[in-house]
Image: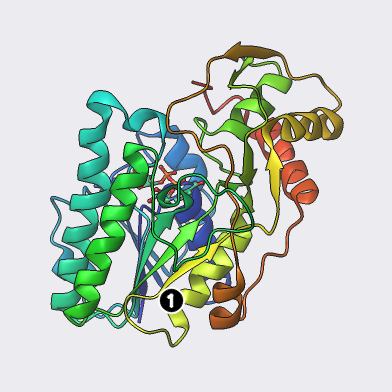
Amino acid sequence: MPLVVTGAAGFIGSTLCSALLADGQRVRALDRRHPATDPIAAANLAAVVDHPDFELVTADLLEVDLADLFDGARAVVHLAGQPGVQTSWGDGFAAHVEGNVLGSQVAMEAARRAGVPRFVLASSSSVYGDVARGGAREGAPVSPRSPYGVSKAAAEQLAGVYAERGLPVVALRYFTVYGPRQRPDMALHRIVAAAQGGDAFVRRGDGKQRRELTYVDDVVQATIAAAQADLPPGWIGNVGGGASTSLNALIALVEELGGRPVPIEPSPALPGDPARTAADLRRTTSALGWSPRTSLREGVARQIEWQASVRALLVSP
Ligand code: NAD
């Protein structure tokens, strides 16, 4: 039975597909970006697109027949969505509602009808907003500070509703994911690109904001575990890297590992950008037997190496 991955041409989705195939599993993948016309999708899927156990459907999930796609699936991992805090303000919110709220609802409705035995929803640390002390705990009330966070919190609420209607859905709150294939709009990608001769890094705020960064392979392993574990419908778990670091410390690490300075263009703080994100991982660790394995130093070194190798393909925003 195949595992269905939506958003498969993206950063996390393509890395998940590679890991599943390497593990001998069949993958049915959906993405609206086509490798023939989208260079990032092409680069992300290059390693898997010809694999005999990999089937790619290029379509918008709001337009395709999901009953066919989900038929016989062992699990659905729903990663398709509209990421990004910055783009969710103003007119951008409509795309976040469509991508994260409507898209999740349509996928969960179809999965329920198809009798899919496990649905994993990609949620985000953005549902928490600011975390003052310690690590954010799943039982705490959510308090998003950006329209993006609101759209992810709404998707989680929908997951609760579909769990009550019998869908075995679980949600994972990913904390700032990084590593090879990271989206070009994300901060670490832009920092590394700046060090490698691209545009100066536009640093929002004073750089003292802290983020828990999570290496993509750790995110993938948690996601695979959540697709297989015996969890109650509606379960929610944090997926974090195990430590929080400031933006300035991250810039210094890129300078040290890459051996080049990062040109910086100071800019006012971004509205909705939390001062600190940090995860309490106890619930996920005990339910999934998972914990993050990649140190920030090791993971950033791998991202620097990857960006150097594909610099010509990716265009910094
Ligand atoms: P990404 O943009 O690289 O991947 C998302 C993919 O979904 C894209 O390839 C896009 O084409 C596809 N997609 C979007 N809407 C679609 C639709 N209607 N039909 C078909 N395909 C569609 O993003 P990512 O960083 O890999 O994130 C994946 C998921 O994880 C998203 O839901 C995101 O909100 C969530 N998440 C990511 C992070 C992170 O740090 N990257 C953190 C928290 C949560």
Viewer can see residue 184: yes
Residue located 50% across and 72% down the image: 224
The 10 Å Cα crowd at callout 1, few under 14, some 14 to 19, many 20 or more, is many
Q: Nearer the viewer, residue 293 or 30?
A: 293
In the orientation shown, which residue stands out farthest toward the front? 132
Residue located 39% across and 41% down the image: 83
Q: Which residue is mark 1?
A: 227
Viewer can see residue 25: no
Q: Position of residue 230 (x, y in %)?
A: 44, 88
Tag 1 secondary structure: helix
Q: Taking 23 as reference, is 51 left or right?
A: left
Q: Is residue 265 above or below residue 270?
A: above
Q: Position of residue 205 (x, y in %)?
A: 58, 22
Q: Taking 289 as reference, is 60 left or right?
A: left
Q: Position of residue 95 (x, y in %)?
A: 24, 36
Residue located 18% across and 51% down the image: 102
Q: Is residue 229 above or below residue 9?
A: below
Q: Nearer the viewer, residue 60 or 45?
A: 60
The quadrant the N terminus occupies is bottom left
Residue located 55% across and 47% down the image: 176
Q: Nearer the viewer, residue 64 or 157?
A: 157
Name the quadrant containing residue 122: bottom left
Colour scheme employed for the rendering of this structure = rainbow
Q: Indicate the amino acid at tag 1.
A: Ala
